[in-house]
Amino acid sequence: MIYDIVIIGNSAAAISAVNTIRKYNSSLSIALIDRENTKAYSRVLTPYYISGKTDVNGLFMVDEHYYNKNKVTTYFGSEATFIDRNKHGVHLSNGKILQYKMLLIANGAEAIKIGFKSDNISNLRHLNDAIKLRKYFLRSKIVAGFGAGLVTIPMMSHFDDNVKKYLIISSNRILSRLLDNESSEIIENSLVKRGLHIYKKENIESIENNNDKIIINLSSGVNLLSDCLIVGKGVKPNTELARDSGINIDSGVLIDEYCRTNDPDIYAAGDVAEGFEFATNRKIIQGNWLTAVEQAEIAAKNMLGQKVAYEGSIKCNITKIFGVGVAVIGIIDDDIYESEKNYNPLTDTYRKYYIDDAGKLKGVVMINNTDEAGIYYGLIKLNMLYRNIIKHKNGLNYSKVLKYLDYK
Ligand SMILES: Cc1cc2nc3c(=O)[nH]c(=O)nc-3n(C[C@H](O)[C@H](O)[C@H](O)COP(=O)(O)OP(=O)(O)OC[C@H]3O[C@@H](n4cnc5c(N)ncnc54)[C@H](O)[C@@H]3O)c2cc1C
């Protein structure tokens, strides 16, 4: 059989594509391939499972009837190994070849691994990683994190205060790829107050097993004894499939504003895709859930023949770290934009707004009061003038601001 649409992946982008296709069309045949043998789950929620705030069922985005109900043929536990563009076929690790009319590559990204081997070391990307880390969560008295990003730090903040925590980072400040200097300093101060020991400008030279623990030897000569090491050294998009079939890639699979690759029958979305960023118009892998959902929706609409262009992705990270709410929306770049900030030391509440030459709001950093982050996401996408937003900064409300809707 030839499937109308084959999707590689079963996560944020893939499920968004299925939902969009079925919203408009109930008859096209859809096949979905994923090397993980499970219904779709949220990676974002895995720290909550590890820390026991939800059971494993709380991670799933869909129930067991979802695929049948949506007439999706699933190939779970099978890896797509090759895309034969001439024959419109996807080769699977079990020897099957699925024929497609159109293909969506939504195979995401993989956590970067460090070379050291030990049962006590884990990345956090997949459900299996979460199941492994859950065991460590229950028994650890000392934990270490390697990497100063949005996986390690939020994950470590789920451990109890009486668990000793080490954070090893190669840069000189935490969340350096996400935040400006001031905001990362504010967060760092509050993490240190909560007992986090941070080792900056460090690398791991070696790791030794020590009974059921590990000793982590740092480049400075410091040795840390720990029950486990959580590695968050970034992710690498799964571009090999596209590359081996001659699809254009740069850091990710290159897509145009219709989320289509250089092959007119092949689209890509999510963490594997490098597409336009709203505001800068440069191509970027945004690496967040919302972008995966939005790009896949656009890809699906175009596969259905609706000619819909994506207005571009924007950065959107909203999280809680050791009880501190942090939201980073849009472009945070002191070299490009003017900024305006306010900080209340009593409440540790910090806001920094990035504004372009035309007075439009381009980005915002929020610390300790992130309730309005979703509203700011919408306002930045709407190209709103900062002066019209700021009038309402104490009690921002979409409807109050939208009356100033002004694209000039
Ligand atoms: C711990 C954690 C916390 C996060 N927190 C946030 C957050 O707070 N906010 C946010 O916006 N984002 C967050 N993210 C990032 C977010 O999860 C990703 O942006 C999102 O999952 C991307 O979705 P995707 O569908 O593009 O790809 P993925 O979720 O990576 O899924 C790709 C799927 O493709 C499958 N696959 C890969 N290669 C193949 C192949 N060759 N054959 C078959 N199947 C294959 C994989 O098994 C996987 O199921 C977090 C991620 C992690 C790990």
Image (tube, rainbow, N blue to C red):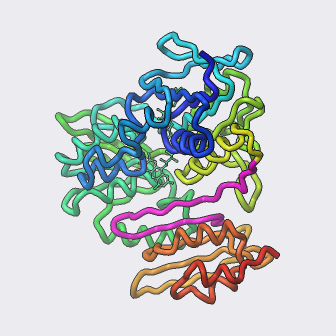
User: Is residue 219 among the parts visible in the rendering?
Assistant: no
- Looking at the rendered image, the quarter that the C terminus falls into is bottom right
Residue under the point 25% across and 33% down: 209
86 left or right of 395 in image: right
For the magenta stretch, what is the residue range?
308-334
User: Is residue 289 among the parts visible in the rendering?
Assistant: yes
Q: Tell me where residue 388 appears, x and y as whole percent.
A: 68, 85
Toward the viewer: 222 or 89? Answer: 89
Q: Tell me where residue 152 appears, x and y as whole percent.
A: 40, 51
Magenta stretch encompasses residue 359? no
Q: Tell me where residue 9 appears, x and y as whole percent.
A: 52, 33
Residue under the point 53% across and 17% down: 92
Above or below — where is 313 with respect to 25? below
Q: In which quarter of the image is residue 262?
A: top right
Toward the viewer: 170 or 261? Answer: 261
Q: Residue furthest top?
A: 95
Q: Residue furthest front?
A: 27
Residue under the point 56% across and 29% down: 30
Magenta stretch encompasses residue 310? yes
Residue under the point 18% across and 47% down: 138
